[in-house]
Amino acid sequence: MAVALAVALSACGGGGGSAPPPAPVSAAVTVEGGEPQAASGVRVYPAAAAPQKLSAWRVVASDGATLALGDRVVPYALNTPLFSDYAHKLRTLWVPPGTQIERTASGPLQFPIGAVVTKTFYYPKAAAQTPGALGARRIEQAEGGETIDLATHHLVETRLMVRQEDGTWGAVTYVWDADQRDATPVRSGQAIAVELVADAGARTPFTYQVPTDRQCVDCHATNATTRRFEPIGPQARHLNRRYAYAGGSVNQLEHLSALGLLAGDATGAPATTVWNDAAASIEARARAYLDVNCASCHNPVGRAAATGLWLGADVVAPTSLGVCKPPVGGAQYRRFAYDVQPGDPDASFLYHRLTSYRPNSEPPRVAMPELGRHVFDAEGNALIRAWIAAMPPVCP
């Protein structure tokens, strides 16, 4: 007998253990004879009591040679992605059969109950010289495709978010097992030794940090008052780009619409500038980079609202962007007159914080972003440096 179960859950997981798989979330998924079932093959669980193996969700699956997507699971990419220690990412979304994603005028897409969004972090393989470290090639990702070849890539973690019965989002992070065939949940974070190897031969050992449950909330709750936890990458303006699917290259919004997964018109959305598009202006590229990497905290209601430094794409006031604005907070602020000193990146507190990272930051909290970055982002920092250097060297 099929029994539909409703479960109200906390915002970012918690719990776990070795108990049998719990009842699924969403009326689109039922329990048959005690086992969760889903018409499309994907199984949806409460995040607070997620199963002990990622494979139970059937969203992504590995046989040790290839990572592949589950039935009706759709990959996607962002025009400008978040920098995460040069890790590559495979992002996916899935919604229950018969449901749709709603577009919004601005902000994240609205997913139906039972939706599952994932992001798998992985590196192209390289030979490491640091004992016990994962060797990783330091190259920018050319996003596309629906599989990952594990002969040439190493899976690190998969972060999964599920929209729950009460409308809130829950999350759980899975770290991939050594044999690369499955992944196990990690709630309190994990440190992984990685050695980045550049094509020119330079080697950078560092500690890759898998986030804790609390840290995932810190990044995904863009309003510090409501603490509403939700996916922030899947926005129409970020998705308005082409993706190389197995069947060919298509605009992502149009692809979702053609699959019947996106409600309403798929056209007319703005598009976030691609941060490394040489054809775009330095201003547009830098603003896109700061928006994606910084604005989740640096916005009028975010955790960094009190700084007055707001870096969202919709900000127009130069002082809100830090131009000729005295910095707020930070133990080293007395060395800098302004967050952004026009024409002088080295005198700009914003640039100093971006170029600081965990191993070289003194004190450690001066480094920005606070999470997810433990190495120098050479290309991103060069972009912000060029943006500041191009400004007329005067304050209003």
Image: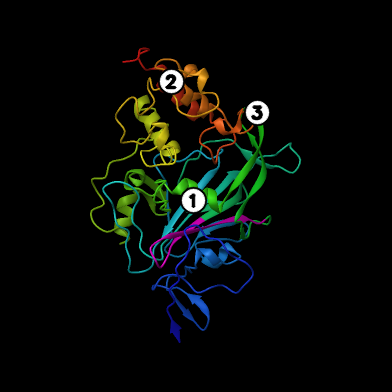
Q: Residues within 10 Å of mark 3 (few under 14, many from 20)?
A: few
Q: Residues within 10 Å of mark 2 (few under 14, many from 20)?
A: many
> Does the residue at mark 1 contact the one at mark 2 (Cβ under 8 Å)?
no
Query: Can you say whether 254 is above or below 297 in the image?
Result: below
Residue 220 % position (x, y): 45, 48
Identified by mark 3, the residue type is: Ala
Identified by mark 2, the residue type is: Tyr
Q: Which residues are magenta?
A: 160-177
Query: Can you say whether 16 is above or below 151 in the image?
Result: below
Residue plotted at (50% across, 17% down): 346
Q: Quadrant of the N terminus?
A: bottom left
Give the alpha-carbon distance from disc 2 to disc 3, as whole Å: 34 Å
Q: How is the image coloured?
A: rainbow
Residue holding disc 2: 338
Chief secondary structure of the magenta portion: strand
The answer to whether one can see residue 280 in this image is no
Residue holding disc 1: 217
The answer to whether one can see residue 47 in this image is yes
